[in-house]
Image (cartoon, rainbow, N blue to C red):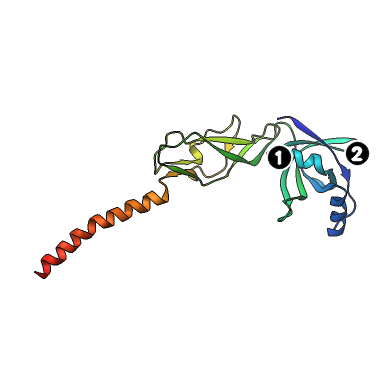
Amino acid sequence: MSEIKLAAEARSEFGKGAARRIRRENKIPAVLYGHGTDPVHITLPGHQTMLALRQANSLFRIELEGTNELAVAKDVQRDPVRGTIEHIDLLLVKSGEKIAVDINVNVVGESAPGTIHFVEAQTLSVEAEATHLPESVDVSIEGLEAGSHVTAGQVELPQGATLLTDPDAAVVAVSEPRGEVADEAEEAEGAAAPAESTEAESTEG
């Protein structure tokens, strides 16, 4: 994973008013913490940071006042309406250190004809080396029949990653379209109805 360099500035103003002023300047308030150090409040360049966060589990090289630290985003707070980034929590990391992250699930392949699939888990939690964090994992449903499912423990993880999610947790389920299931149920009921009617008439006679 390549590092993304971000030039940070120390931040001494806090509160909602200060945060609004920072965002008006196209910057993002953030906090840098970890490794037993005191949290450091900083601002990051808005546009550059926003682009960097499009890549899952990005590794940042934070340059601050002549120093630089490796970090990953642990929490990104966004405006619920506009979707703009309001604040970022950055966790300090170092080469060789393992940390827990969530990786996206990508479904690949086609299930058996006449079936559909449902993604039960959009992400999986894994532990991986901090400077080689995976972005996503592919989950194949090629040829799976209705009633099949893929659990977290069946997913082939990227090299060096260890699963933290419950291995029995469902990730993808394959089934028949609901309309077809309902039609089959109606047909079954229809087939049973004449038999029930005949039995009732026989009893009355």
Residue matched to label 1: 54
Q: Is residue 27 visible?
A: yes
Q: Say which amino acid is labelled 1.
A: Arg
CB within 8 Å, label 2 to label 1: no
Residue 72 image offset from top left, x and y in percent = 73, 40
User: Is 180 positioned to the left or the right of 127 in the image?
Assistant: left
Q: Secondary structure at mark 2?
A: loop
Residue matched to label 2: 65
Q: Residue at x 32, y 51 (%)?
A: 184
Q: Is residue 92 visible?
A: no
Residue 61 image offset from top left, x and y in percent = 80, 35
Q: Quadrant of the N terminus?
A: top right
Q: Residues within 10 Å of mark 1 (few under 14, many from 20)?
A: few
Residue 166 image offset from top left, x and y in percent = 52, 45
**Nearer to us: label 2 or label 1:** 1
Q: Quadrant of the C terminus?
A: bottom left
For the residue pair 8 and 84, the one nearer the viewer reads as 84
Instruction: Give the Cα separation between the discs numbered 2 and 1.
Output: 26 Å
Q: Residue at x 80, y 48 (%)?
A: 31
